């Protein structure tokens, strides 16, 4: 994990993500899936994509290089790094975290969201 990020980030340290961020993202994604009611069986194949934030200073006139990575959950419950790439970040561009789920996981989330309602 560390080697994959080091290969992409090189010597850069600003606007980059690293193995610690990937581990935290996997942990947070697992918690979110559980909190949203996704069964363990339906968590396989879920993904999380994290993009670093761009420079906060408006004095930055040009795009900065940053990091984006994607991890995917296996059927065994492990999270594997699928991709880590260098991206261009604009000044003021916020970081982001996006989740991908299966249709079965979406049904779990819907069921969980509506379980306190009578139809």
Image (cartoon, rainbow, N blue to C red):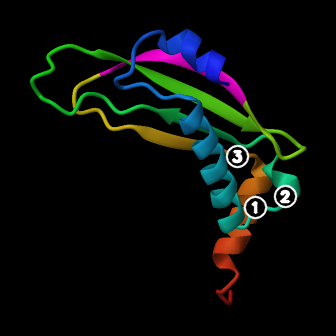
From the viewer's side, name the closer residue of 10 and 26: 10
Q: Secondary structure at mark 1?
A: loop
- Find disc 3 in the rendering and name its residue: 101
The magenta stretch is 81-89
Q: Is residue 4 above or below residue 110?
A: above
Percent coordinates x, y for residue 11 in the rendering = 43, 10
What number is the disc on residue 47?
A: none
Callout 2 crowding tier (Cα within 10 Å): few <14, some 14–19, many ≥20 = some
Residue at image position (69%, 53%) is 30
Q: CA distance from mark 1 to mark 3?
A: 10 Å
Is 112 drawn above or below residue 21 in the view shown?
Answer: below
Q: Secondary structure at mark 3?
A: loop
Of pointers 1 and 3, the one earlier in the residue sequence: 1
Q: Residue furthest bottom?
A: 118
Quarter of the image containing the N terminus? top right
Indicate yes or no whether the magenta region holds residue 98: no
Tell me the quarter of the image containing the C terminus.
bottom right
- Callout 3: few (<14), some (14-19), or many (20+) C-alpha neighbours within 10 Å? some
Res 57 → quadrant: top left
Q: Are marks 1 and 3 in contact (CB under 8 Å)?
A: yes
Rendered residue at 70%/73% (across/down): 112
- Say which residue label 1 marks: 38
Residue in the foreground of this view, choosing between 9 and 76: 9
Please tell me whether the stretch drawn in magenta is mainly helix, strand or loop.
strand
**Sequence-wise, which precedes: disc 3 or disc 2?**
2
Pointer 2 residue: 40
């Amino acid at each position: 994990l560390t080697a994959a990020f080091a290969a992409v980030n090189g010597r850069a340290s600003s606007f980059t993500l690293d193995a610690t961020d990937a581990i935290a993202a996997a942990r947070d994604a697992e918690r979110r899936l559980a909190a949203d009611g996704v069964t363990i069986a339906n968590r396989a194949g879920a993904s999380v994509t994290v993009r670093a934030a761009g420079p906060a200073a408006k004095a930055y006139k040009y795009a900065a290089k940053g990091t984006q990575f994607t991890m995917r959950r296996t059927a065994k419950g492990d999270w594997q790094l699928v991709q880590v790439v260098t991206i261009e970040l604009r000044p003021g561009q916020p970081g982001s975290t996006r989740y991908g789920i299966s249709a079965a996981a979406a049904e779990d989330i819907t069921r969980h969201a509506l379980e306190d309602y009578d139809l």
